[in-house]
Image (cartoon, helix red, strand yellow):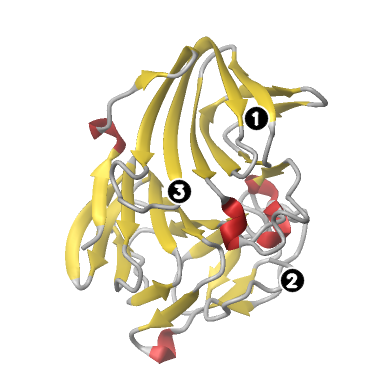
């Protein structure tokens, strides 16, 4: 059965000068997990050291506020529109003058999930997801924005996307094979099903589905539901309970603000095991 809990149930522990860390996922909660997921709160004036182990990959998504990421060779300003990929051995300080929150995922021994990881390790990358293309679902009103793909992060060790469900929208029943699958709910509320058993979901919830566990979701009739989901490794298979519901994601030619996006993505099927070159 899926594991589901809200971030408010996880204690916040000191993690640096003015920073707090909530360990949402890890071996303490899921034995044998290949990912550690933290929620970090940076109070005004906080300074948090970032030190990525030599064999690890770190990915983060800003939730609110602003912060500055200061490394030896560059300084980057992060807002709630940004996701960052931090390669093995990356060192920096994350500073927040007025406060910020973010989720941060570490994949230890990431080379297990990417045959090119050691010979061609990914570089630091910062993306503004609000400028990325919005894709429309073929069968329903869902929308997708990619957050972590081979094109964006330079590795197949992780794959992630933001999924938007307009009020009342639901998705077909399906399961995934070959990857850990986690969801973090950014806003809204709705119902999730795991092996046909329903449970409520809301902002701040984390849901973890077991490999091959059937699942689907529905947004509340009066509320848009948005979540970030990610997979480790980023190469896996998706199987639908009803094969006629296999979803093709269609390009819209715009970003989430209605502007021309920074790149284009062609239509593609969620049945694809390997991401198309433009994803």
Q: Is residue 242 left or right of residue 196?
A: right
Query: What residue do we see at 42% from left, 33% from top?
Result: 39
Q: Earlier in the sequence, mark 3 or mark 1?
A: 3
Query: What residue do we see at 74% from left, 50% from top?
Result: 121
Question: In the orientation shown, which residue stands out farthest toward the bottom?
Answer: 244
Dot in front, 2 or 3: 3
In x, y percent, where is residue 139? 46, 79
Q: Earlier in the sequence, mark 1 or mark 2?
A: 1
Mark 3: which secondary structure? loop
Dot in front, 1 or 2: 2
In x, y percent, where is residue 144? 54, 62
Residue annotated with mark 2:
277
Crowd tier of the residue under label 1, counting other residues whose Cα lies within 10 Å: few below 14, some 14–19, many 20 or above: many
**In the drawing, what numbered circle is on residue 78?**
1
In x, y percent, where is residue 127? 69, 44
Q: Is residue 164 left or right of residue 173?
A: right
Rendering quarter of residue 249:
bottom right
Mark 1 touches mark 2? (CB < 8 Å): no
Rendering quarter of residue 187:
top left
Crowd tier of the residue under label 2, counting other residues whose Cα lies within 10 Å: few below 14, some 14–19, many 20 or above: few
CA–CA distance in space, label 3 to label 1: 23 Å
**In the drawing, what numbered circle is on residue 35?**
3
Mark 2: which secondary structure? loop
């Amino acid at each position: 059965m899926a594991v589901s809990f809200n971030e408010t149930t996880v204690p916040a522990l000191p993690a640096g000068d003015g920073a707090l860390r909530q360990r949402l996922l890890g071996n303490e909660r899921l034995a044998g997990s290949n990912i550690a997921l933290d929620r970090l709160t940076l109070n005004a004036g906080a300074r948090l050291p970032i030190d990525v182990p030599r064999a690890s990959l770190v990915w983060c998504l800003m939730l609110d506020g602003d912060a500055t990421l200061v490394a030896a060779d560059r300084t980057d300003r992060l807002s709630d529109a940004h996701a960052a990929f931090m390669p093995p051995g990356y060192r920096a300080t994350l500073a927040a003058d007025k406060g910020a929150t973010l989720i941060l995922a570490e994949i230890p021994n990431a080379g297990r999930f990417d045959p090119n990881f050691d010979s061609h390790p990914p570089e630091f990358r910062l993306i503004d997801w609000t400028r990325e293309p919005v894709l429309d679902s073929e069968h329903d009103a869902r929308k997708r924005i990619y957050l972590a793909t081979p094109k964006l992060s330079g590795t197949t060790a992780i794959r992630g996307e933001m999924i938007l469900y307009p009020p009342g929208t639901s998705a077909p029943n399906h399961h995934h094979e070959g990857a850990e699958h986690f969801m973090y709910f950014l806003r809204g509320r709705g119902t999730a099903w795991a092996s046909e058993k329903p449970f409520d979901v809301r902002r701040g919830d984390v849901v973890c589905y077991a490999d091959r566990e059937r699942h689907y979701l529905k947004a509340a009739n009066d509320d848009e539901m948005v979540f970030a989901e990610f997979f480790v490794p980023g190469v896996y298979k998706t199987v639908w309970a009803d094969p006629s519901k296999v979803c093709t994601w269609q390009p819209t030619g715009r970003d989430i603000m209605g502007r021309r996006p920074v790149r284009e993505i062609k239509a593609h099927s969620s049945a694809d095991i390997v991401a198309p070159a433009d994803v």
